[in-house]
Image (cartoon, helix red, strand yellow):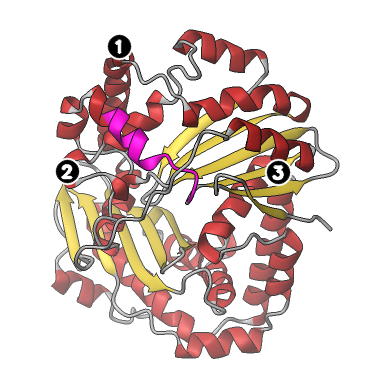
Amino acid sequence: MSEIRTVTLENGLTLLLEPMSGVSSVALHWLLPAGSATDTHDGEGVVALLGEMLFRGAGGMSSREHSDALDRLGVRRSNGVSAHHLRLSVTMVGDQLAEALPLITSMVTAPTLDEQSLDPVRRLCIQELDSLDDEPQHAVLLKLGARLMPPPYNRHGYGRREVLESATIEQVREAWRQRFKPQGAILGIAGAFDPDAVVKQLNDLFRDWTGRSDEPERVGDAARGHEHVTQPTAQVHLAMGFDAPPERDPQAVLERIAISVLSGGTSGRLFTEVRQKRSLCYSVYAQYRPGRDEGLITLYAGTTPERAAETLAVCQQEIDRLSDGAEDAEFQRAIIGLKSHLVMSGESTSARASAIARDYFRLGRPRTLEEVTRAIEAVDRMALNAYLAERNFGAGTVVTIGPEPIAASETVASAAPQPG
């Protein structure tokens, strides 16, 4: 059984350590309190620029020098922006960790942030934002998230075009100075490494890095409702969203199993009823997204304009039909599917580093794979069905992208029972 150590470093950073036997790699997943919600209203996109600037030199080294040094050690790195955090992820062979840590940590504590790197980063961020026009499936889910969450936590991580075009290097530097603080940051490390040696080295590396960054307050309520974005596409991209329990809710495990019944691959109800039986769409799935303070169910379906109304109606029907409970075969498939996913993620150091950091943010503590597995195994079908009998999903928030809106009257008509 694996053991996870939780250590608060001398500067206040939370460090989570999970040594793993039988692996040769090590992964780091760093959650910095600098998500898109921390951008000012007129600076929405500065953190996206900052995230890319971290890879353009650090620790007194130029972009090329720093990149070459990491490449020589085989360090793979990536970043991303969520509402709460700027995420920095790296993987490498465990034997290289001690030599790589100064290079990795300098990206956070001493990025170069030189002005000549800003324009190339600016062009890259604008290109990523513009690429959403070619990815309507991704775009419709982002727009759904914007309606499901209250501001400023309803922002995606791509920023606004006008901000990306006009932001100055001083705005980027100020964002780094104000938001990159150790207290509130979470660093998860999993794989082949010596925990005691890492704690000592990080305390030395972070000796001069101090401070705390506070979370922005919520402003107003989520928009919810319905939204249509008109685009001259041959398909309609449909997204639905529903409230769900947060991760710390004891019912979260029941919700996770229920959504596995609904959308557990090709045997799930959505795939069977919406695609296989009715041939309404080419893609349909739902996900449970438990957060720290709330949870969400998101559903996506890609269909044709002629079948969009019926697709929406049948998806809502299947959500509502969960209240009837799960059959034994469905329940068993859901349990096996969830446990299989856990086994496979347990073999990945990057998945484990991400999971323990995410758990700490959502729950205030990390969980071992064994703990998560036990929670799933402790649920029986009677408990699941009792939960579903009381679960009221209600009418969802709906966003569509396509040539024309779905008329409410069409949806109601399509929802009527069909003969045969």
* Residues rendered magenta in the picture: 172-183
First in sequence: mark 3 vs mark 1: 1
Q: Tell which circle, 2 or 1, labels the residue nearer the N-terminal end.
A: 1
Q: Position of residue 318 (x, y in %)?
A: 42, 74
Q: Number of labelled discs?
A: 3
According to the image, label 1 marks what residue?
116
**Residue 391, can we see it?**
yes
Nearer the camera: disc 3 or disc 2: 3
Q: Depth check: give the residue in front, 394 or 278.
A: 394
Real-space CA distance between mark 2 and mark 1, rounded to the nearest whole angstrom: 37 Å
Camera-side mark, 3 or 1: 1
What is the three-letter code of the residue carrying label 2? Gln
Residue 177's place in the image compared with 229, above or below, is above
Q: Residue type at mark 1?
A: Gln
Discs 3, 1 touching: Cβ within 8 Å: no
Amino acid type indicated by mark 3: Ala
Question: Dot 1 lies on which element?
Answer: helix
Q: Is residue 156 visible?
A: no
Mark found first going from the N terminus, 3 or 2:
3
Graded by Cα atoms within 10 Å as few (under 14), some (14 to 19) or many (20 or more), the crowding at tag 3 reads many
Instruction: Give the residue pinned by disc 3.
Output: 190
Q: Quadrant of the C terminus?
A: bottom left
Side (left or right) of 348 relative to 398: right
**Residue found at x 48% / y 19%:** 58
Q: Nearer the viewer, residue 312 or 77?
A: 77
| Nearer to us in this view, 392 or 374 | 374
Which image quadrant: the N terminus? bottom right
Q: Residue drawn at (60%, 13%), measured in percent from left and top?
A: 69
Q: Name the front one of labels 2 and 1.
A: 1
Q: Main secondary structure of the magenta part?
A: helix
